[in-house]
Image (cartoon, grey):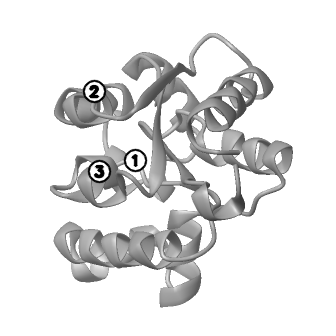
């Protein structure tokens, strides 16, 4: 399939699901660029995500996040690690659908909490009891995550195995 028919690969899931770890592995295997949406927002704004949340609030951050995703989706097909909450925002999945293969990296909230516990300050929505907050995030977002075109179990396999599963999906469903 030609490059014009390729779709972006957008990885979604809880913080700690491996989007930023698996994404570069997938991009390398596909010969594609990788974009970590949070890192792109930080570069463009000149501020860290926690600072943006503190200064402007979550609603403003979500507008910035949506705008940055639209910028990336307007470019050449690549692998994108979306922020954990991007998929749960109204219209996000619908906007990317057709332009991207949306892949949910699924794992239990307890596993995500254990992985994310080392950097709670970098994740504003995990302030407090990380396990409790992660369970609440999953409960609020799972309906959106489950609307993705594909689901990959991110709990049991190492990042390389998860990446292989995503690469297979990209080749069979997204023109790679």
SS state under label 3? helix
Question: Which callout, 3 or 2, points at the residue further toward the start of the chain?
Answer: 3
Residue under label 2, please give it. Answer: 132
Tell which tag, 3 or 2, sits nearer the viewer. Answer: 3
Q: Answer yes or no: is residue 46 visible.
A: no
Query: How many neighbours does mark 3 have within 10 angstroms: few (below 14), some (14-19), or many (20 or more)?
Result: many
Residue 93's tag is: 3
Q: Position of residue 176 (x, y in %)?
A: 71, 45
Tell me if residue 170 comes above or below residue 138 in the rendering: below
In front: 93, or 65? 93
Tell which tag, 1 or 2, sits nearer the viewer. Answer: 1
Residue sitting at the far top: 156
Alpha-carbon span between mark 1 and mark 2: 16 Å
Q: Answer yes or no: is residue 166 visible.
A: yes
Tell which tag, 3 or 1, sits nearer the viewer. Answer: 3
Alpha-carbon span between mark 3 and mark 2: 26 Å
Q: Position of residue 90 (x, y in %)?
A: 15, 55
Side of 125 where 118 appears, left or right? right
Q: Position of residue 2 (x, y in %)?
A: 71, 57
In front: 3, or 140? 3
Alpha-carbon span between mark 3 and mark 1: 13 Å
Give the number of marks.
Answer: 3
Q: Quadrant of residue 143?
A: top left
In front: 4, or 27? 4
Q: Quadrant of residue 83?
A: bottom left
Residue shown at the point (58%, 69%) measured from the top left: 39
Query: How many neighbours does mark 1 have within 10 angstroms: few (below 14), some (14-19), or many (20 or more)?
Result: many
Residue under label 1, please give it. Answer: 84
Given contact means CB atoms under 8 Å apart, are the residues at marks 3 and 2 in contact? no
SS state under label 1? loop
């Amino acid at each position: 399939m030609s490059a014009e028919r390729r779709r972006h690969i957008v990885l979604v899931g809880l913080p700690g699901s491996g989007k930023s770890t698996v994404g570069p592995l997938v991009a390398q295997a596909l010969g594609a660029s990788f974009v970590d949406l949070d890192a792109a927002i930080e570069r463009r704004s000149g501020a860290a995500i926690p600072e943006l949340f503190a200064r402007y609030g979550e609603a403003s951050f979500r507008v910035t996040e949506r705008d940055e995703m639209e910028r990336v989706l307007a470019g050449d097909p690549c692998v994108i690690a979306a922020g954990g909450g991007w998929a749960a925002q109204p219209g996000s999945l619908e906007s990317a659908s057709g332009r991207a293969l949306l892949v949910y990296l699924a794992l239990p909230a307890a596993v995500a909490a254990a992985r994310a516990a080392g950097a709670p300050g970098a994740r504003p929505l995990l302030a407090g009891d990380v396990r409790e907050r992660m369970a609440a995030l999953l409960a609020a977002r799972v309906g959106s995550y489950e609307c993705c075109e594909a689901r990959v179990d991110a709990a049991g396999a190492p990042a390389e195995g998860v990446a292989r599963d995503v690469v297979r999906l990209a080749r069979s469903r997204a023109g790679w």
